[in-house]
Image (cartoon, rainbow, N blue to C red):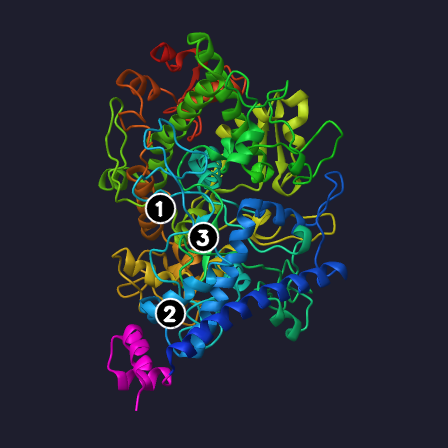
C-alpha cells in the first residue's frame, strides 16, 4: 500500500496517479525526498571545496599557470586569455552559487529519477530546495527609485516591473532549452548517431581555414565595421570562465584521464595528429564558463553568467558596477579621469592585465578589463573618453550651477545616446541590411522621438547571441593593424594582442593613428574564412604557443549546450537541412563548396554546430550575415531597442527634449573621429572606405551637437 505522504509527493511531482508515481519515484516519502535534497546540496558544496583543493594543488605543482604579476614580464598565451575573461569580484560569489545549484540539481534528478522539468514543477521539492539552498545562494533583489532620471550603472531598475532584466552579473537568457548531454550540466559532446562530435579544432580546420597567401577583402567596408562590433560586444556581453587559485589559469592538457575527470571545469579540445599549427599537441586547453544561478536560485539546468549590463549603455567606458564607476570618475566637473595625453590612467588592480614594453606605458583602467585586447578597441574607447570630457566641459560652461553629479550624468546620457544612434542608424544596417531593419522596426528616423518602449520586452542578452551569432565579426578581422601617420605602416595582430605600446607611441598620439587606420583599412571578406592571426596565432607568446579563436567559439557553444545549427534554423522559421548538399532539402543558404566543407567533418546535418553553420551561410543581399545570424542578431537588437526604458529616442523624463533629440541625431562617427583623432578630413561614412561615392570631407563640414539645447 502506498503511504499518504508518498502519494502527496508523487502528485505534486507528476500530477499523475499514485500508482504510476510510485513506479517512477520508487515510493519515496516526503522525508526521504527531503533527505535527497539536503544530501545533494551538501555534496555539491563538498564538490566545490574539492575543486578548490585541486586548484591549489595544481597551482602549487606548476600545472596551472600562476597569474603574471609583472606587466613587464612576457605573458603566456593562457595568461593573456585569462585576462580577456577575467572573473571580477562581484561575480565570484555568483559563480560558486551557480556551481552548487547545477551540481545539486543533477544529483537530485538522478537519485529521484525525475527530469529537471519535473523537479521544477514539484511544489514539495521546490519548497525543500529553497529552504536549504538559501545558505549557499542568495536570491537577487533590488529596490528602485521610480522617479530616477538616469539609468543605473549596473542596469538594474530599467524595467520597473522586472528590475533585474538587463542587470550585470545575471544569467544569459535562453531562447531554446540547452541540450546538455545529461540534460543538466555536461557539455554537448555526443552526435545524433551516438558517437562523439568532431573536435572543434577539426571543424575550424575544415571550414574556416584562410589561405594566408590570398585573403579576400570587402570591396567597400572598412575595418571600423569589425571594431565597432567588438566595442558593442564588450558593452553588452562579458562571460567569464572558471579560474584557478589566486586567479591562476587552469591548464587542462597533459593530465592523465583520471585526473582530467576530477577537474570538472575542464573541457579540452582534442587536436588531431598532423595538425599544421599545433603539432605534437594532443589538445588545446579549454576551461568552462562559470555557472550562474537564476535570480531566485531556482533548481535547474546550468546557466552562464554575463558580467556586463545587457543594455547599449557605454559600460565599456563607465563600468558595469558601481565600484568600477567610482574608480573611473574624477568627481570634478563631471569628468572622467584622464591623462595629459588624453588616455585612460592606470588602475591599481589593472596593472597586471596587459603586457608592457616600456616604462612610460601602463595598463589603462576603463569600464572594461578587455580594453587592451586589440589596439583598435583601445582607440575607440579613448575616443569616447575624450568625448565625455568634452561634453562635460561644455555643459559646465552652459550651466555653472550644475553639480559634478549633474554634469556627469547628463554627459553620460548624451554619450550613450551617441553610441545608440550610430549603432542603429549607421552600423546595424550594414550588418542586417535595410530590408531586415525595416521589417524588424529598427530603422531610425532623422528627426523626432520614437516612443517604442515595451515593458514586456526582455532585453537580457541571449546565450545564443553572445556565444555564437555576435561572433560573426571574427570573419571581418585582418591579419594586421593599420597605423596611419606620415606614411602608412602595418603591424601584425600577433604583436599587439593585449599590448598597448602602440597606443602610447608618439606621446599618446598612437590612439589617433590607429583610429584613423580603422577607417582606411578594408575589412576581410564576410565569408566562412578567418585569418591566421586569430585562427592559429591568437595570443601568440614568446614560446611560440597560441590559441585558435574559432575552436574556442565552437567549444564555448558546446560548453553552453546551445542546440545545433538545424534547431536554430527551425526556431527562426527557416528551412532546415536533411542532407549535406546545397539543393532542396539541403543546406539551401550555403554554397556547394561550403556545404561540402561541412560534410567533410560532420557525420549528420543535425550535428552541425551553430557557429560554423551560421558563419558559412551566404550573406543576405545588402548585409554581412546569412539568414540565421540575421534572425538571431535582429531579434536581440529589437529587444535592446524596445526593452530599454532609457533608449535615446524615447521621450519623457528619462529621454531628451525634442530639440535635443533632433540635434543629437546629427552626430556622426566622422565628427567624433575629427574631434578626437586629430584629423582634418574624413570620409562621410567611416564604416565604408573612401571612394567616389564616399569622398573625404573637411572636418568643419560635419555638424556637431547644438549644446545650447542643454542650457538651463
Per the image, is 3 magenta?
Answer: yes
Circle 2 SS class: helix
The span from disc 1 to disc 3 (Cα, nearest Å) is: 12 Å
> Mostly what secondary structure, the magenta segment?
helix
Q: Could you tell which of marks 1 and 3 lies nearer the N-terminus?
A: 3
Residue 123 location in percent, x, y? 32, 67
Tell me: 634 left or right of 231.
left
Q: Quadrant of the N terminus?
A: bottom left
Per the image, is 688 magenta?
Answer: no
Q: Could you tell which of marks 3 and 2 lies nearer the N-terminus?
A: 2
Tell me: 249 left or right of 96.
right
Q: Is residue 550 visible?
A: no
Count the marks.
3
Numbered mark located on residue 467 in the image: 3
Numbered mark located on residue 125 in the image: 2
Q: Which residue is mark 1?
A: 633
Q: Could you tell which of marks 1 and 2 lies nearer the N-terminus?
A: 2
Which dot, 3 or 2, sits closer to the camera? 2
- The relative height of residue 687 versus residue 66 in the rendered view (above or below) is above
Q: Is residue 477 visible?
A: yes
Residue 350 location in percent, x, y? 64, 37
The residue at 43%/72% (across/down) is 603
Mark 1 crowdedness (10 Å alpha carbons): few <14, some 14-19, many ≥20: many
Farthest residue, direction bottom: 1
Span highlighted in magenta in the image:
1-27
- The relative height of residue 34 versus residue 312 in the rendered view (above or below) is below
The residue at 39%/71% (across/down) is 604
Residue 531 location in percent, x, y? 54, 47
Circle 3 SS class: helix
Amino acid at each position: 500500500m502506498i503511504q499518504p505522504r508518498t502519494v502527496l509527493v508523487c502528485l505534486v511531482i507528476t500530477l499523475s496517479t499514485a500508482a504510476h508515481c510510485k513506479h517512477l519515484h520508487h515510493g519515496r516519502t516526503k522525508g526521504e525526498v527531503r533527505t535527497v535534497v539536503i544530501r545533494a546540496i551538501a555534496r555539491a558544496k563538498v564538490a566545490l571545496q574539492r575543486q578548490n583543493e585541486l586548484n591549489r594543488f595544481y597551482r602549487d605543482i606548476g600545472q596551472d599557470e600562476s597569474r603574471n604579476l609583472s606587466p613587464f614580464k612576457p605573458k603566456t598565451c593562457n595568461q593573456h586569455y585569462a585576462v580577456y575573461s577575467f572573473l571580477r569580484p562581484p561575480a565570484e560569489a555568483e559563480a560558486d552559487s551557480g556551481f552548487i545549484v547545477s551540481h545539486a540539481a543533477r544529483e537530485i534528478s538522478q537519485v529521484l529519477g525525475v527530469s529537471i522539468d519535473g523537479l521544477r514543477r514539484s511544489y514539495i521539492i521546490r519548497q525543500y530546495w529553497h529552504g536549504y539552498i538559501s545558505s549557499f545562494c542568495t536570491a537577487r533583489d533590488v529596490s528602485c527609485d521610480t522617479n530616477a532620471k538616469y539609468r543605473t550603472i549596473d542596469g538594474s531598475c530599467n524595467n520597473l516591473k522586472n528590475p533585474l532584466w538587463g542587470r550585470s552579473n545575471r544569467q544569459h537568457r535562453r531562447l531554446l532549452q540547452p541540450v546538455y548531454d545529461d540534460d543538466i550540466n555536461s557539455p554537448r559532446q555526443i552526435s545524433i548517431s551516438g558517437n562523439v562530435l568532431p573536435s572543434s579544432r577539426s571543424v575550424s580546420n575544415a571550414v574556416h581555414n584562410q589561405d594566408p597567401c590570398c585573403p579576400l577583402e570587402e570591396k567597400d567596408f572598412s575595418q571600423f565595421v569589425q571594431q565597432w562590433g567588438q566595442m558593442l560586444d564588450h558593452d553588452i556581453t562579458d562571460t567569464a570562465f572558471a579560474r584557478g587559485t589566486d586567479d591562476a589559469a587552469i591548464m587542462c592538457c597533459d593530465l592523465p584521464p583520471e585526473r582530467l575527470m576530477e577537474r570538472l571545469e575542464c573541457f579540452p579540445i582534442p587536436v588531431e595528429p598532423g595538425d599544421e599549427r599545433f603539432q605534437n599537441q594532443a589538445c588545446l586547453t579549454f576551461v568552462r564558463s562559470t555557472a550562474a544561478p537564476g535570480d531566485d536560485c531556482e533548481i535547474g539546468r546550468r546557466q552562464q553568467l554575463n558580467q556586463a549590463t545587457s543594455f547599449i549603455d557605454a559600460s565599456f567606458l563607465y563600468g558595469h558596477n558601481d565600484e568600477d564607476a567610482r574608480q573611473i570618475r574624477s568627481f570634478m566637473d563631471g569628468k572622467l579621469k584622464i591623462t595629459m595625453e588624453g588616455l585612460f590612467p592606470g588602475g591599481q588592480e589593472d596593472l597586471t592585465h596587459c603586457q608592457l614594453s616600456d616604462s612610460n606605458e601602463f595598463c589603462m583602467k576603463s569600464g572594461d578589463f578587455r580594453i587592451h585586447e586589440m589596439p583598435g578597441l583601445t582607440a575607440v574607447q579613448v575616443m569616447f573618453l575624450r568625448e565625455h570630457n568634452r561634453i562635460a566641459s561644455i555643459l559646465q560652461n552652459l550651466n555653472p550651477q550644475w553639480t559634478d553629479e549633474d554634469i556627469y550624468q547628463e554627459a553620460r546620457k548624451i554619450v550613450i545616446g551617441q553610441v545608440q544612434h550610430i549603432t542603429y542608424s549607421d552600423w546595424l544596417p550594414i550588418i542586417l541590411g535595410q530590408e531586415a531593419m525595416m521589417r524588424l522596426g529598427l530603422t531610425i528616423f532623422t528627426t523626432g522621438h520614437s516612443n517604442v518602449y515595451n515593458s514586456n520586452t526582455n532585453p537580457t542578452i541571449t546565450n545564443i547571441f553572445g556565444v555564437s551569432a555576435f561572433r560573426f565579426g571574427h570573419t571581418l578581422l585582418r591579419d594586421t593593424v593599420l597605423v596611419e601617420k606620415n606614411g602608412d605602416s602595418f603591424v601584425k595582430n600577433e604583436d599587439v594582442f593585449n599590448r598597448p605600446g602602440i597606443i602610447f607611441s608618439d606621446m599618446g598620439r598612437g590612439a589617433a593613428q590607429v583610429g584613423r587606420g580603422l577607417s582606411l583599412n578594408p575589412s576581410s571578406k564576410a565569408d566562412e574564412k578567418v585569418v591566421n592571426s586569430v585562427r592559429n596565432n591568437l595570443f601568440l607568446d614568446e614560446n611560440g604557443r597560441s590559441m585558435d579563436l574559432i575552436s574556442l567559439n565552437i567549444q564555448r557553444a558546446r560548453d553552453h549546450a546551445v542546440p545545433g545549427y538545424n534547431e536554430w534554423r527551425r526556431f527562426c522559421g527557416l528551412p532546415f537541412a536533411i542532407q549535406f548538399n546545397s539543393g532542396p532539402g539541403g543546406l539551401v543558404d550555403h554554397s556547394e563548396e561550403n556545404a561540402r566543407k561541412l560534410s567533410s567533418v560532420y557525420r549528420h546535418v543535425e550535428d552541425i554546430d551553430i557557429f560554423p553553420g551560421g558563419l558559412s551561410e551566404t550573406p543576405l543581399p545588402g548585409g554581412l550575415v546569412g539568414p540565421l545570424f540575421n534572425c538571431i542578431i535582429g531579434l536581440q537588437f529589437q529587444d535592446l531597442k524596445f526593452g530599454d526604458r532609457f533608449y535615446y529616442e524615447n521621450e519623457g523624463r528619462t529621454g531628451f527634449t525634442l530639440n535635443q533629440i533632433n540635434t543629437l541625431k546629427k552626430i556622426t562617427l566622422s565628427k567624433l573621429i575629427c574631434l578626437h583623432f586629430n584629423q582634418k578630413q574624413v570620409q562621410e561614412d567611416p564604416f565604408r572606405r573612401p571612394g567616389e561615392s564616399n569622398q573625404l570631407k573637411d572636418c568643419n563640414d560635419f555638424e556637431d551637437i547644438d549644446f545650447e539645447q542643454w542650457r538651463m
